[in-house]
Structures are given as C-alpha cells and as structure tokens.
Image (tube, rainbow, N blue to C red):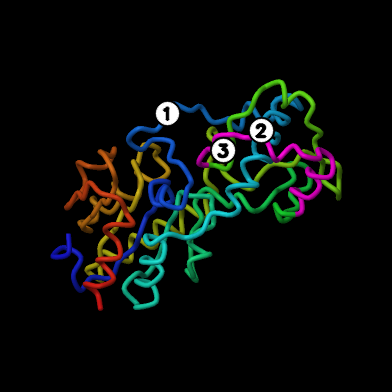
Amino acid sequence: MFDVLADRPLVALTGAGLSTDSGIPDYRGPGSPDRTPMTYQEFVTGEDAQRRYWARSHVGWARMAHAAPNAGHRALAALEGAGVLHGLITQNVDGLHSDAGHRAVIDLHGRIDTVVCLGCTRRTPRAALQERFAALNPGFADAAVEIRPDGDAELDPALVDGFELAWCTACGGVLKPDVVFFGENVPRDRVTRAYALVDAMAPSGGALLVAGSSLTVMSGLRFVRHAHKLGVPVVIVNRGTTRGDEFATVLVDAGCSDVLPALVTAAA
C-alpha cells in the first residue's frame, strides 16, 4: 500500500466503516445484523411513517451527537493538512470529518445534523428540532436502544405510537433530515464535484484511497470504477470484501483506525 501511495496526491472516499471506532455501527461490515433502513418512498407516505422515523431518530440522535472523530478521521485530516489529501468524498452523514478539522468535504449523502422542510425547503439545525421534540415528548430520548449508522435506532413500536411530531415553523410542512434516503438520488452538483476530484488525480499521478466502505451502493462504487477507467490507482482499506475489489490496485483488509495513521507517518 505504501509503495503505491508514496509521493502521490490523494483523494479519499470514505464509508461507514471509518466511523465504527467512534461508536457508530456499520450497516454492512462483518458481523453487522441485517437492517432495513426507511426509504424515501416510505417516509413520504404519511404521518405514521414519519412518526416511526422521527421517534427512533430522536432517541438515536441523543447518542450519535456525542460521537467524536477517531484515529482514522484524524489521520485523513492530517493528510489534508500536509497537502497530501486533495479532496474527501464521504458517504457518511455523521459530520465527523468536519469535526476532525477537514476544510473541504463533499458530504455525498448529506448531513444528519441539518433538517430540511419538504414544503418550503428551509434548512434548520437538527439541534433545534431535538429541543422541540424533547419539549413535545419529555423523557422519550432516555429509552434504551440500539443505534443505527444513520442515527436511527431500534425502538419498541408501542413507544412510537405516542410520539408527537414537529412541523416546519415557517410553513407547517413535513420535516426530514437533510440526508439522502435509500430511494433518493444524490444531488447532481455533489456528484459532479466528486467526479472532478477523481478526474484531477489522472494528470497529477494521484490515487484514490477508499476507507471503510463496502462500496455496496452505486453512489460510491461509481467513483472507484471511474478511477479505474482513468488508470488512477485505487487502494481500498476496509474490514472484509467490497464490491469494488476487482478494481483495486491494493486491498487492505483491516480497520481504518489501525491503517490510516501509518499513512501520516509515511508521508511525514
């Protein structure tokens, strides 16, 4: 891995496996239980689905908000600071790259710490919505649950039925976390900017570093395929196999927190 990446500019593509050492579980990593996240199509069917989502997410957020960047996040931020990492594309919605000090991140799937109104498109901080939910549902966030990668949580359906929803304070519309749900498309401008980062690696002799992604969904895999097509080396660091293994120049089956700090040392 170090031989391939030595003296090359890098672009990183990160996934949920990078954040597992911060206490945020992975949907698809080794040993992960089967989970079926709510789709956009289900969310917009009405209040029952929205109540299920927000009740679980309200509880999950209370714990997810305390997650902190781990050694893998900090290593990538250090590589950016050293001028080695020229761009970062993340499939994660947890905001931990920004917390680690990254100045320029393409949040491919959005950010869980922001809320958008489906009516007027107004965006507001998630923390403000949490306060409103807490006032409407006192004590609800104290439920003992299992947290999911998107800040959702496993919750007894009986608890969900009594959860009070909150609506947009500007227009009364439906509120949704400002993330790309399953069944939604990634906004075109984000995709275009991400492709541009990968494109820039070809003439500069750079490489694409994939960290903690199984590349199961096309939103991330397409950039690996694109890099391979351009002749840009692809290094994948992930626990277990990925859908992009056939396009990789080097595969490292290991945790990001174990491997990425060594890249910082090698680049020093």
Specify the quadrant that holds the N terminus. Answer: bottom left
Dot 2, crowdedness within 10 Å: few (<14), some or many (≥20)? Answer: many
For the residues labelled 1 and 2, say whether their Cβ atoms are less than 8 Å apart: no
Query: Looking at the picture, does residue 100 appear above or below residue 29?
Result: below
Looking at the rendered image, the quarter that the C terminus falls into is bottom left
Q: Earlier in the sequence, mark 3 or mark 2?
A: 2
Q: Is residue 17 above or below residue 84?
A: above
Q: Badge 1 local density, few (<14 within 10 Å), some, or many (20+)?
A: few
Q: Secondary structure at mark 1?
A: loop
Q: Nearer the viewer, residue 148 or 181?
A: 148
How far, Cα to Cα, is label 3 from label 2? 12 Å
Residue 181, numbered circle? 3
197 or 182: which is nearer to us? 182
Q: Position of residue 110 (x, y in %)?
A: 56, 51
- The residue sitting at 24% across, 56% down in the picture is 230
Residue 164 falls left or right of residue 155: right
In front: mark 1 or mark 2?
1
Kind of residue at disc 3: Phe
Q: Which residue is mark 2?
A: 53
**Relative depth, front residue between 230 and 169:** 169
Q: Earlier in the sequence, mark 3 or mark 1?
A: 1
First to last magenta residue range: 128-149
Which of the 4 image quadrants contains residue 72?
Answer: bottom left
Residue type marked 1: Pro
Residue for point 78% across, 47% down: 120
Residue 169 is inside the magenta segment: no
The residue where tag 1 is placed is 33
